[in-house]
């Protein structure tokens, strides 16, 4: 089964910009992997911010965007807010099933 | 409004069985693919299995870690998704979530504890 890799942790300043990435051991991540980005805050259920590469949910703040970048899926946060501090997981559909990355712990500091 | 409500979790002994349910509302259930995902407390998310929609012949897929022990099924007449779990191990202890995807709506989860 494919291994999905994410940065274990990132720090961004309030108002700053940060990009989280999601790579696959099988090679280039494409739109055919239907990348999802899932946010989870402590004590809460996960919720999807981005699905199918760049589609937002109704609750997804405008400052979040999804894309494909350098062979990976990417989640860009422009204008970070304190409430964006959370764990972020990418989720890919691969040939033998679906796979989560290990998650990125994002600190806003 | 989409609602997913998981149920059926609880304490079960190693080697035991359990069936989780996910009651769905707010969308045409038969049109949607559904997933089970689990999370060991304090750890990351792990995909468990998938049930494709009626248009995709209700095909199912399982993660390697549960293959042969867990089975995903659905009953479109009841708008419900199920996870049949057998030969449970301590490492299956987790919160189990159902998801409708696309677009990735999650339920609140149900806790399964495997312990003697």
Image (cartoon, coloured by chain):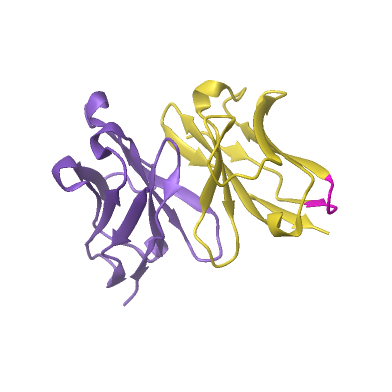
Residue closest to the eye, A108 or A25 = A108
Q: Can see residue A13?
A: yes
- What is the display colour for chain A? yellow
Q: Main secondary structure of the magenta part?
A: loop
Horizontal and vertical percent for residue B91? 41, 62
Residue B61 appears left or right of B101: left
Q: Residue at x 84, y 46 (%)?
A: A16
**A12 magenta-colored:** yes
For the C terminus of chain B, give its image quadrant. Answer: bottom left
Q: Going 27% across and 37% down the picture, which residue do you hit?
A: B28
Answer left or right for B80 relative to A14: left
| Residue found at the far bottom of this picture | B116
Chain drawn purple, letter? B
Frontmost residue, A104 versus B28:
B28
Using the image, determine if residue B38 lies above or below residue B42. above
Q: Is residue A73 visible?
A: no
Q: Which region shows up in magenta?
A: A11-16
Confirm whether the magenta stretch covers residue A50. Answer: no
Q: Find residue A4 and report its image quarter.
A: top right
Residue B22, percent across and down? 28, 54
Query: In the picture shown, does residue B93 fall above or below A60?
Result: below
Residue B7 lies, in percent from the top left, at 28, 63
Q: Is residue B24 above or below residue B59?
A: below
Q: Toward which corner of the image does residue A61 lie, by quadrant?
A: top right
Residue B71: x and y in percent read 24, 46
Q: Residue at x 23, y 32 (%)?
A: B58
Q: Residue at x 41, y 30 (%)?
A: A96
State left or right for residue A31 relative to residue A12.
left
In this picture, residue B116 sits left or right of residue A51 = left
Check the image and name the residue furthest to the left: B77
């Amino acid at each position: 089964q494919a291994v999905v890799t994410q940065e274990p942790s990132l720090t961004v300043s309030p108002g700053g910009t940060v990009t989280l990435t999601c790579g696959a051991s099988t090679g280039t991540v494409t739109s055919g992997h239907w990348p999802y980005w899932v946010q989870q805050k402590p004590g809460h259920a996960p919720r999807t911010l981005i699905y199918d590469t760049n589609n937002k949910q109704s609750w997804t703040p405008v400052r979040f965007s999804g894309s494909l970048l350098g062979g990976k899926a990417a989640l860009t946060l422009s204008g970070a807010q304190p409430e964006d501090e959370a764990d972020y997981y990418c989720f890919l559909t691969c040939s033998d099933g679906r796979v989560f990355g290990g998650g990125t712990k994002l600190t806003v500091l | 409004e989409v609602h997913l409500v998981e149920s059926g979790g609880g304490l079960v002994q190693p080697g035991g069985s359990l069936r989780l349910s996910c009651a769905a509302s707010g969308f045409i259930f038969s049109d949607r693919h559904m997933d089970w995902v689990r999370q060991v407390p304090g750890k990351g998310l792990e995909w468990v299995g998938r049930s494709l929609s009626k248009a995709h012949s209700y095909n199912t897929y399982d993660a390697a870690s549960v293959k042969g022990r867990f089975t995903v099924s659905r009953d479109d007449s009841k708008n419900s998704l199920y996870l049949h779990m057998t030969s449970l191990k301590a490492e299956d202890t987790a919160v189990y979530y159902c998801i409708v995807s696309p677009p990735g709506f999650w339920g609140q989860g149900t806790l399964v504890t495997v312990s003697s």
